[in-house]
Image: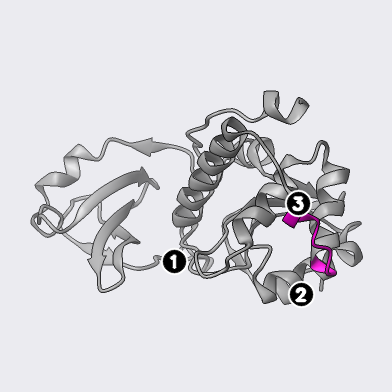
Amino acid sequence: MKFFTLLITLTLSLLAGDIDIKPFASIPMLSQPHIKVLKAYDHGSIYELQLEVPTPRGAQRTPAFVTKDKKVVLLGEAMDASTGDAIKRPIDMEAIRKNADLVFGAGSEEYIVFTDPECPYCVKFERMWPSLAEKVKLYVFFMPLSNHANATRMSYHVMKQEGQISKAKAILDMANGDRSFERLTMSQQISDLFAQKIDENKALAEEFGVRGTPSVFDAKGASVMWNRLGQ
């Protein structure tokens, strides 16, 4: 099948320009055993880090910023003093365009979407898509949640379709009550590939700081309210 040849194992470089994390190991606050520096990026005037820290819900990723002299660590977001915009690493949109599970719409406004096809709010959002198709282009990554029993199978059902038109039809049909996903069959090899892709999607979601679905981001990485899209 064509989709099999297109589905490749990826380590997506979603955010461009990572630098070596080793120099940050000398910062006492960051050298503690319960804190792990995963990535670092040089914004020119300040460093951005992605940390993994323990929480009651398990290990969580969180952003932090470090001054150039490495004497001050700031947790959370940092803003550009001249514009008020959050400082974020540039997104590799070519990787996003290439590796989305589904591309929907033909508009000029590009958005990155993390969705669970069994999530009630995702369903409401998906029902909006046809009315947005001429204005937006959605790069959709499936992120089935563990509390939704059918979400993984529903995601696979869309991923298995050949071509974007068929994929779009499958997800929109499900949003309107179709249950063809219940008859889904596939080889173990394809199932394993899809499972790996979903794992990669979840890693990307962590890069964005996704905490639920649907989550939508613009091409600069800024969070967008899904129910205000197209306004």
214 to the left or right of 84: right
Query: Is 158 covered by the magenta stretch?
Result: no
Residue on which disc 2 sits: 124
Q: Residues within 10 Å of mark 2 (few under 14, many from 20)?
A: some
Residue on which disc 3 sits: 183
For the residues labelled 3 and 1, the Cα–Cα distance comes to 49 Å
Report the span colored magenta. Answer: 175-182
Residue on which disc 1 sits: 79
Amino acid found under the numbered disc labelled 3:
Arg
User: Which image quadrant is residue 79 in?
Assistant: bottom left
For the residues labelled 2 and 3, the Cα–Cα distance comes to 24 Å
12 to the left or right of 65: right
User: Which image quadrant is residue 23 in?
Assistant: top left
Of residues 182 and 121, which is closer to you in this image?
182
Residue farthest toward the top in the current orientation of the protein = 5
Amino acid found under the numbered disc labelled 1:
Met
The local secondary structure at tag 3 comes to helix
The local secondary structure at tag 2 comes to helix
